[in-house]
Image (cartoon, coloured by chain):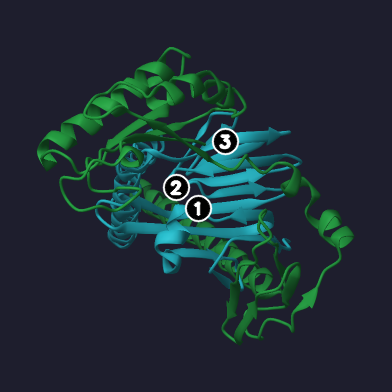
Amino acid sequence: MSLVTEGRHKDDLDLSRQPNCAKGSRLMGIIYAVRLRLGCLAFFLFMAAPAVAQDDGVALVKVLEGSAFTIQGDDKQVLSVGSAIRREDVVETASGTVGLTFKDGSRISIGPNSRIEFKKFEFSSKEGKFAFFISIIRGTMLYISGIIAKLSPEAVKIETPVATVVVRGTRFLAKVEGD
Amino acid sequence: MTVRLEEAFAFCRYIVRRLLLRARLSRTIYLVVLLAATGCAARKNIFVLLPDKDGKIGVIEVHTKGGVQIIDQANQSTQVADADSKPQTPAILLKTEIVAGWGAVLRNMPLPPKTFIFYFQWDTDRLTPESKAQISAIMAEVENYPAAELLIVGHTDRAGTTRWNAGLSLRRAKTIEALFRETGLRHNLIEIESHGENNPLISTADGIREPKNRRVEVTIR
């Protein structure tokens, strides 16, 4: 928020210093308009973020060795045992390892130097809505399926930058080499 | 004269800004190209199917744009070199290779969820004597789970009306919830559901009394 207003403020100042040069000011005007539009876009993106953050947790940290983090936008949080993982969180580890249990009983553990993005999680037997979709950007992981995979195997998808794994049961390891 | 000077200044400032903008743009383009290059570079992937704890062996399918590989044997693995080639021919990994590559994740997997069943006396929310005797053992089990969460689901048999049974199964679930509350679990770590007579363990005709269906299932995770 502060970033956006700062940006606008700076542009306002620039504009007030505009000399009476027709060519310059027209171009400045265009640049200003583009900037303003970008500013608005950033503003709306910012406003949309809290709606995601308010979502229920989809998993809890149960095991932790060393340190691990969740990242959502610019927000980086240190995880501890009992921390919630929310929809669309990104989990990163450096030297640490973290073990998570999801609401449907699916479990994953994430090894050192990993980055995992939580794309989608739906677990509602009443509405028949199931989804378990994560993306391993780099690192190591152990996955053990839960109720979602039992009730709706096609709802489970685990992808990496080059491959997609379809899980028909139950327990597998993955390693994705990073940069 | 001053107007001319001002104009000249403005023009200079405009040129400098354009140049700066272009510099920023070209830096962005450079970064994008760099990202694309590293993204396309071979980032080897390995996937290994492990047997379940009970010895059962599942199946995973590894897909790329180049093809599919089906992995259905214990400790069988496939490698993916890049997005365009088919995952490599499966190979069985040695235990030592698995531990060397994935020791940390194997060591730090959370405990599997566990489900316990409490049985109730007919048409009441009073536990059977056998179930009452098991309470302390189940309570102790919760202690083994770090950041334990509970799912408590109430059920009835098919004696009585559906509506009555919906209420009865909720009362049963709440009775069990109260027991676990005493152990100090936070409110948001306990979830309650009431299924009435809709999810029997043993299916019966309507109106039949079945002790195995008069229950509350508690899953610790």
Tell which of B190 and A134 is nearer to you.
Answer: B190
At label 1, the amino acid type is: Gly
- Number of residues whose C-alpha sits closer than 10 Å to that of mark 3, classed few (under 14), some (14–19) or many (20 or more): many
Q: CA distance from mark 2 to mark 3?
A: 14 Å
Quick check: B173 left or right of B165?
Answer: right
Q: Chain of mark 1?
A: A
At label 3, the amino acid type is: Val
Q: Percent from the top left, x then y, of residue B141? A: 58, 26
Which badge, 2 or 1, is on the more N-terminal residue? 2
Tell which of B59 and A138 is nearer to you.
Answer: B59
Q: Colour of chain B?
A: green
* Residue, far right: B96
Same-chain status of marks 1 and 3: yes
Quick check: B1 left or right of A160?
Answer: left
Q: Colour of chain A?
A: cyan
Secondary element at image label 2: loop
Residue under the point 55% across and 60% down: A135
Q: CA distance from mark 2 to mark 1?
A: 6 Å
Q: Which mark is residue A104?
A: 2
Residue B179 visible within the image: yes
Q: Chain of mark 3?
A: A
Marks 2/1 in contact by CB < 8 Å: the verdict is yes
Q: Which mark is residue A61?
A: 3
Tell which of A42 and B134 is nearer to you.
Answer: B134
- Number of residues whose C-alpha sits closer than 10 Å to that of mark 2, classed few (under 14), some (14–19) or many (20 or more): many
Q: CA distance from mark 1 to mark 3?
A: 16 Å
Q: Quadrant of residue A150?
A: bottom left
Quick check: B158 left or right of B135?
Answer: left
Q: Percent from the top left, x then y, of residue B97? A: 86, 62
At label 2, the amino acid type is: Asp
Quick check: A142 left or right of B220?
Answer: right
Q: Chain of mark 2?
A: A
